[in-house]
């Protein structure tokens, strides 16, 4: 019975050590909030910014607007769109959604048009 307890404690210590190291590594490398926010925008706003869908204006309470409002820097989100993503989304729709949701892009930037 004692060896089972010792094995359990060792497993717990190994787990804590690994999770603490991964958190420390993330903190030391810095988190790219722009890419994280961009991925959330692609997930939550796809139906509003996809090129082939109609101009669907989001409601302020839907997840898309919540994501747009929570974005730390909406301009850097636009800078993180990949070439492939830009073939699938409409930047003018993205700019419109940012304004409707209350975190609008500045006029005359490359994303805002």
Image: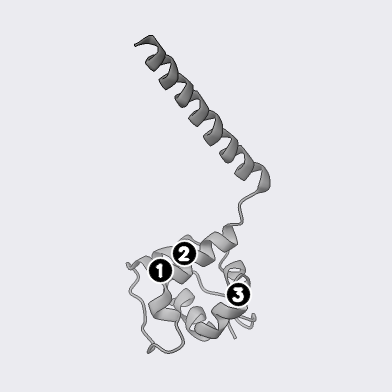
Which residue extends farthest right? 29
Looking at the rendered structure, the secondary structure element under dot 3 is loop
Quadrant (top left/top right/bottom left/bottom right) for the C terminus: bottom right
Q: Is residue 76 visible?
A: yes
User: Which mark's residue is nearer the viewer, 3 or 1?
Assistant: 3
Check disc 1 and report the residue beneath it: 44
Q: Residues within 10 Å of mark 2 (few under 14, many from 20)?
A: some
Describe the element under mark 2 as helix, strand or loop: helix
Q: Residue at label 2?
A: 40
Percent position (x, y) of residue 88? 50, 83
Q: Is residue 26 positioned above or below 60 on the image?
A: above
Q: Is residue 102 visible?
A: no
Name which residue lies at 40% across and 79% down.
48
Residue 8 numbered tag = none
Camera-near label (2 vs 3) is: 3
**Colour scheme used in the picture?**
one colour
Q: Kindly indicate the quadrant of the structure image that contains residue 100.
A: bottom left
In space, the residues marked 2 and 3 are separated at their CA atoms by: 14 Å
Please determine whether, in this image, residue 4 is positioned above or below residue 111.
above
* Rendered image quadrant of residue 54: bottom left
How many labels sit on residues?
3
Q: Position of residue 45 (x, y in %)?
A: 42, 73
């Amino acid at each position: 019975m004692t060896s089972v307890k010792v094995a359990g404690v060792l497993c717990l210590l190994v787990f804590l050590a690994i999770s603490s190291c991964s958190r420390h590594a993330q903190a030391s490398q810095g988190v790219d909030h722009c890419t994280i926010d961009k991925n959330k925008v692609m997930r939550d706003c796809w139906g509003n910014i996809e090129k082939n869908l109609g101009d669907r204006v989001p409601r302020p309470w839907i997840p898309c607007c919540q994501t747009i409002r929570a974005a730390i820097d909406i301009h850097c989100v636009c800078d993180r769109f990949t070439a492939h993503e830009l073939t699938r989304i409409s930047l003018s729709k993205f700019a419109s959604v940012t304004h409707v949701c209350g975190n609008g892009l500045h006029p005359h930037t490359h994303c805002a048009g």
